[in-house]
Image (cartoon, grey):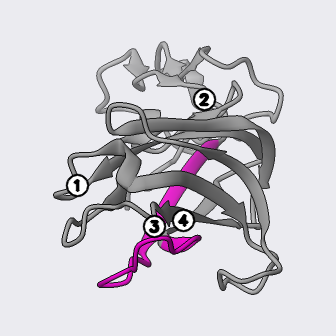
Amino acid sequence: AGRSVWIVFDLSPTATIGATVGSRLPDNTSFATTGGSVFGATFPLSSGLTTVRGPLVTVTWANLAPPTARQGRSNVPMLGLTLSVDVGAATVTGFRLNKGGTSALDRDVAMAKVWLDDGDNLFDLGDTLIGRQPFVAGTTVIAGFALPVSAGTDRVLFVTYDIATTATVGATVTARLANERYVAVDPPASVDP
């Protein structure tokens, strides 16, 4: 009976980012056999090439927006973000947020804020404000921090809005990270699309 052989690689944690790896067996002498022979294959046997990448940050989210918020209310929860990394560690350095909804005025939201959870997975007074910015043309960038994320240890963040005292009554607002480019990480990490 025939046997299948799998060729696998264990990549070093210090492997060169962007390098490619693969395998190639030039001929049947690449196999050592005892009491048998190798036949039936068309040599050379070559795998595809795999590009070495750094840690991959994954962002999952939860909608925390209440159905209504009164004018002048501060710290209205909008999004819960959970950051995880597949291997090693990564540093998250910022977020871009878009304000959506029916609100046409940036000033309806006085301030967008990002908070680091204190470990209880609830937005509360124990959480730490790590950045805040107003919206300009429906978008804002909250950066200037260095948040480490390690494999096996998720980080939870909350996005909140301060609703302006003059916010348009009846208008709706949303918070949105449009794609992976809305999350800034230090190289060699990247963000899962």
Residue type at mark 1? Ser
Which numbered disc, 2 or 4, marks the residue closer to the eye? Answer: 4
Residue 92 to residue 16: above or below: below
Q: Is residue 13 left or right of residue 1?
A: right
Q: Quadrant of the N terminus?
A: bottom left
Image spot of residue 33 (x, y percent): 60, 39
Q: Is residue 93 left or right of residue 109?
A: right
Kindly indicate whether the residue at mark 4 contacts the one at mark 1 (C-beta within 8 angstroms): no
Q: Which residue matches tag 3?
A: 61
* Residue 75 lies within the magenta run: yes
Q: CA distance from mark 2 to mark 3?
A: 24 Å
Residue type at mark 3? Trp
In front here: 42 or 80?
A: 80
Residue drawn at point x = 26 percent, y = 62 percent: 168
Badge 2 marks a residue whose secondary structure is loop
Badge 1 marks a residue whose secondary structure is loop
How many residues crowd mark 3 within 10 Å: few (<14), some (14–19), many (20+)?
A: some
The mark that comes first in sequence, 3 or 1, is 3
Q: Which residue matches tag 1?
A: 103
Q: Which residue matches tag 2?
A: 53
Residue type at mark 4? Thr
How many residues crowd mark 1 within 10 Å: few (<14), some (14–19), many (20+)?
A: some
Residue 6 to residue 143: above or below: below
Magenta span: 56-77
Residue 175 to residue 181: above or below: below
Image spot of residue 134 (x, y percent): 52, 42
- Which disc, if any, is residue 160? 4
Residue drawn at point x = 78 percent, y = 73 percent: 127
